[in-house]
Image: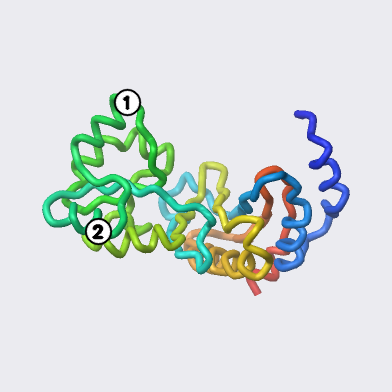
Amino acid sequence: MPKRGKKYQESIKIIDNQKLYDTEEAIGLVQEVSKANFDETIELSVKLGVDSRHADQQVRGAVVLPHGTGKTKRVLVFAKGDKIKEAEDAGADFVGAEEYVNKIQKENWFDFDVVVATPDMMGVVGRLGRVLGPKGLMPNPKSGTVTFDVEKAINEIKAGKVEYRVDKTNIVHVVIGKKSFGTEKLSENFKIIMDAIIKAKPAAAKGRYLKSVVISSTMGPGIKINSQKLMD
C-alpha cells in the first residue's frame, strides 16, 4: 500500500467507512475532506450488478449535466462538405478528415476530449478503432457522437454532456463537477447521472443492480452512499 499524505490521513478520520451515507450528506462530506490547494474534481463510481462481457448487459449512454463538469471539453469533429462549416460555427476545436487520422496514427496526437463524426465519415474514423476504443473516445450513436446534427452534438458537449459506460470490472466512472460547485449543484448533477444509470438497467441484469455507489475528490478518500435509497 502506498503511504498516504497527512491531509489524506486527516480526511479518513472524518469519514465512517462502515456507514452508508445519504446523498447530500456524502456530497457535503466529500467537499469537507477535499483539502488540496486546487479545485478538486468530484467523481462518482458505481459498481453495477451486470456482466459487461455480455452484449445484452452493457450500460452506456450520455446526459447533459445541468451545471456541467467544470471543464471545457475539446471537441474533434470528423466531417465533410457543409458539415465542416457547421462544426466550426458551433465551436468545434478541430474539424477535418484524413489529416486527423494521420495525425493520430503517426504522431500519437490526442489533444482532444471528445470525438464527433457524421455517419458518412465512420468508414474513415473506423480505422482509428484500435486507438480510440481503449481510450473511450470512439464515436457512438448511443452517446450522440455519431450524428448529422453536428451543431447540437457540439453544443451539448460544451454545455456539460458526459458519457457513462460500464468498464470491464462492471464499474461506471463519471465526473459530476468540481468542489467549488457547492452541495446544491453537485447534488443536481449527481441526481441526473444516477437517474440515467438506473434507467439504463439492462433487462438481462439479475439480482441487485446498484452494488455500490461511491463519490470521491481527486485527492480524497471514497465516501459510500446508500444505494438502496437511490432505487426506491
Gap in angstroms between the C-alphas marked 2 and 1: 27 Å
Dot 2 lies on which element? Answer: helix
Q: Which residue is mark 2?
A: 89
- Marks 2,1: beta carbons within 8 A: no
The residue positioned farthest toward the right in the image shown: 13
Q: Name the residue rendered at 33%, 58% in the picture.
A: 154
The percent coordinates of residue 86 (x first, y second) are 21, 59
Using a 10 Å C-alpha cutoff, classify the residue at mark 2 as few (fewer than 14 neighbours), some (14 to 19) or many (20 or more): few
The residue positioned farthest toward the top in the image shown: 106
| 31 w.r.t. 110: above or below | below
Q: Taking 14 as reference, is 227 left or right?
A: left
Q: Name the residue rendered at 77%, 63% in the picture.
A: 21
The residue positioned farthest toward the left in the image shown: 81
Q: Name the residue rendered at 70%, 43% in the picture.
A: 219
Q: Give the foreground label among 2 and 1.
A: 2
Q: Taking 67 as reference, is 157 left or right?
A: left
The percent coordinates of residue 130 (x first, y second) are 34, 33
Pick the front one: 48 or 108: 108
Residue 152: which quarter of the image? bottom left
What numbered label is drawn on residue 16? none
What numbered label is drawn on residue 107? 1
Residue 135: which quarter of the image? top left
Type of residue at label 1? Glu
Instruction: Tell me the quarter of the image containing the N terminus.
Output: top right
Q: Earlier in the sequence, mark 2 or mark 1?
A: 2
Dot 1 lies on which element? Answer: helix
Pick the front one: 162 or 52: 162
Q: Taking 119 as reference, is 135 left or right?
A: right
